[in-house]
Image (cartoon, rainbow, N blue to C red):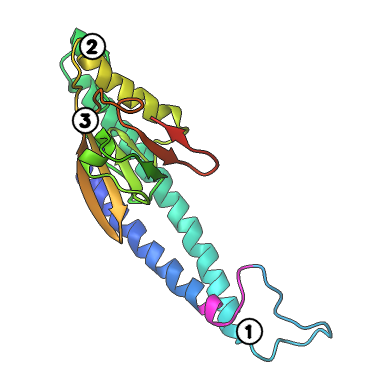
Amino acid sequence: MATLEEVKKLIAQRDIIDKQIAEQEQILKENGVDMRSSLIDSEGFPLANVDVYSVRHARQAVICARNDRQKLNDRIEALMHELHAIAKQERPSSKSDSKGDESEQPVHRTNNHPFARVDKVSSMSPAQQAGLKDGDQILQFGSLHAATFNDMSQFTRIVQNSIGSFKNSDLFKKIRVTVLREGRAERLELIPQQWSGRGVLDCSVLPVTSAQVI
C-alpha cells in the first residue's frame, strides 16, 4: 500500500536528480553549446573553444538522468493516484462530499513547479485583498497544482465550487493559494466575493498561451 512517506522519499530523490541535471547543463552552458549543438567545425575538426570530452560526458549524463527522472515521476504519479483512491474510500460519504469541495480538500503537490502566472490584479479587488500581486507564479490553487493542471477551466471550476458553497451570501468559501514570489513560496487565502468591479476575484491568470479573468 502506498504511503505519503514513500512519496516524499521519491520526491527527494527526484530533487537530487534535478540538481544533477542542472550541474551538467551548466557545463554545456559554459562551453556555449546545448544538447544538440555540433561539436565540429565546417571542416570536420573538433571546435577549438569547446571541451568536447566534457560536453559529451555531460550530454550522456543528462540523458541518463532525465530517463531516471521520468521513471521516478511515473512512480510518484502512480502512488499519488493510489493515495487519493485510498483517501476517497476512507472519506465518509455525504451529500456535501459528493459535490467535491476542491478548495478545502487536502492537497499534496508532487513538485514546486509553477503552472500559471498572475498577470493583472485590479486595485481593491478580492484578489488584491488576499495578497496576490502581478507576476506571482502559482504553485497551488485550491486542489490544483502542476501535476493536475490541464487547462484554465479548472481555475473557474474551483472558484465556482467556492461560490456554490454559499449561494445566498456575498462572501464565499476561501481558496488556499500558494505562489512563488521572488524565489520564496507565499501561502495566501483567497476569498471570492461580490465587489464593485468585475467578477468575484478580478485578477488575470496567464497560462502558456492566453489569459483568463476570473
Q: Where is residue 86 shown, x and y percent of the image?
A: 24, 27
Sequence-first disc among 2 and 3: 2
In percent of width and height, residue 44 lies at 81, 84
Decide: few, some or many residues near mark 3? Use Cα within 10 Å; few <14, some 14-19, many ≥20: many
Marks 1/2 in contact by CB < 8 Å: the verdict is no
Above or below 55: residue 167: above
For label 3, the residue is 191
Would residue 188 be found to the left or right of residue 28 on screen?
Answer: left
If the image is split into quadrants, where does the N terminus sit? top left
Residue extending furthest toward the bottom: 48
Answer yes or no: is residue 100 visible.
no
Kindly report the distance in space between the C-alpha atoms of the residues bearing marks 3 and 1.
56 Å
Which of the 4 quarters of the picture holds residue 53?
bottom right
Residue 170: x %, y % from top left: 20, 18
Q: Which-is-in-front pick, marks 1 and 2? A: 2
Residue, disc 2: 167
Residue highlighted by disc 1: 52
Magenta-drawn segment: 27-35
How many numbered marks are there?
3
